Image: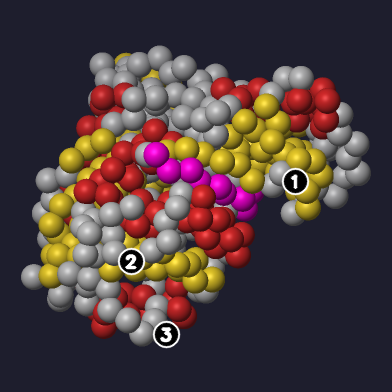
Amino acid sequence: MVVEIEKYDDFGRGICFINNKITFVPNTVPKDKVSIKIEKEYKNYNIARVIKYIKYSKLRVKEKCPYFNKCGGCVLQNIDYETSILYKKEKVINFFKKNKLNINPIVITNPNNYNYRNKINLKVINNQIGYYEEKTHNLILIDSCIIASKVINKGIGLIKDIGIKNGNVTLRSNLNEELLIIINSNDKLDIDIEKIKSKVKLVGIVINDKIYYGEDFLFERLNNLLFKYSYDSFFQINPYIASKLFEIISSYINREDEILDIYCGVGTLSLIAAKKAKRVIGIEIIENAVINANFNAKINGLNNVNFLLNDATKAITKINRSFNKVIVDPPRAGLTKTVIEAIKEIKPKKIIYVSCDFHTLVRDILLLSDIYEIEDAYILDMFSYSYHVETICVLKIH
């Protein structure tokens, strides 16, 4: 059957309607005219695939990635960057509005929307290297990634030299173009370190959580602060947008503030806040991240910040002091109900909520809405050409 794609869904799939039933068609652009075949039928929706493109949309552009439509990562590469930003802005606003929340967000675009990622995870199966196709275990073979940093792309080419047959390889880099290689594999590896060092600035190799060569951490300098982060610690994957995020956080901090930073990682937001605040406490569950955070406070000369190694849900109920502001940057699952209730008990004047999933962000805002309302909102293009969006909502007491 032939249909015209009306719009995108929140995950970058095209939408059409067949007999008034919503039908999702991956790999399409709004106003594409396509012949489709329904692959799966459910009670409330269908999943279809394109058989033939009858007429391309005027919004469509030629994608730059040779693996587009295969790996499933950059679903928006077939529209121009400005159109992708408009799509992200509209879907966030519309989802808030659907939940009776009105926002007028400031949008922060990515000046480096290619070669921006400082971390990728690769699979190696029978000496073949690639990404898993989205929601499958089908290996899409790659030899480069257009959104990964240039040194990571060099690193992809070096994986075969490592001699790994089966396993996982994570490549991490920094703005100084240094590379950290993390391997999980049962293979016995004999790595030619000098060969790798002749091609990249190799900081270290970690195999099965043990240092094989060099160090197991990287340094990054952003916003006049130096950050150390271990191979297994969270660090924002886009340093350019991370810098803008830090500026936004800083703009809401004052000299008299006492701040609680939940899910603090290696202390990035805590330290940004500590440069201006009276006192900051950060909570994090990953031990290496807390070690890094304390080290980062020391090397940046900030003695008004402390870090606690604990699960946020458990720790927040034990903290016996008042905070006038709380920063949260949770994983995609958002805040637990225990954390939300504890925040309500603390009752800070402001909550600065950083989120990589606006759906769980909205859910949590609604759970906080008996006390808090949205003061400001931001959309940051942390994940260019993917459907993911980084958002910040600043909440204030009614």
Mark 2 or mark 3, which has the lower sequence index? 2
Q: CA distance from mark 1 to mark 2?
A: 35 Å
Residue at the extreme left of the image, as rendered: 398
Q: Which residue is mark 1?
A: 206
Q: Main SS type for the magenta part?
A: strand
Instruction: Give how far across and how far down residue 369 sits, in percent.
Output: 17, 71
Check if mark 1's residue and mark 3's residue have beta carbons within 8 Å.
Answer: no
| Amino acid type of the residue that numbered disc 2 sits on in the rendered structure | Arg
Mark 1 or mark 3, which has the lower sequence index? 1
Q: Secondary structure at mark 3?
A: loop
Q: Which residue is mark 2?
A: 279
Q: Is residue 221 above or below residue 31?
A: below
Q: Which residue is mark 3?
A: 318
Query: Is there any visible trace of residue 361 in the rendered image?
Result: no
Which colour style is shown? secondary structure
Q: Is residue 332 above or below residue 167?
A: below
How packed mark 3 is, by other alpha carbons closer than 10 Å (few <14, some 14-19, many 20 or more), is few
Q: CA distance from mark 1 to mark 3?
A: 36 Å
The mark lying in front, picked from 2 and 3, is: 2
Tell me the magenta residue range: 224-232
Instruction: Give how far across and how far down residue 238 sits, in percent.
Output: 44, 37
| Amino acid type of the residue that numbered disc 3 sits on in the rendered structure | Lys
* Picture residue at 88% right of the left edge, 40% below the top: 189
Q: Is residue 235 left or right of residue 166?
A: left
Instruction: Give how far across and how far down residue 74 sits, in percent.
Output: 45, 32
Q: Is residue 3 above or below residue 364?
A: above
Q: CA distance from mark 2 to mark 3?
A: 18 Å
| Amino acid type of the residue that numbered disc 1 sits on in the rendered structure | Val
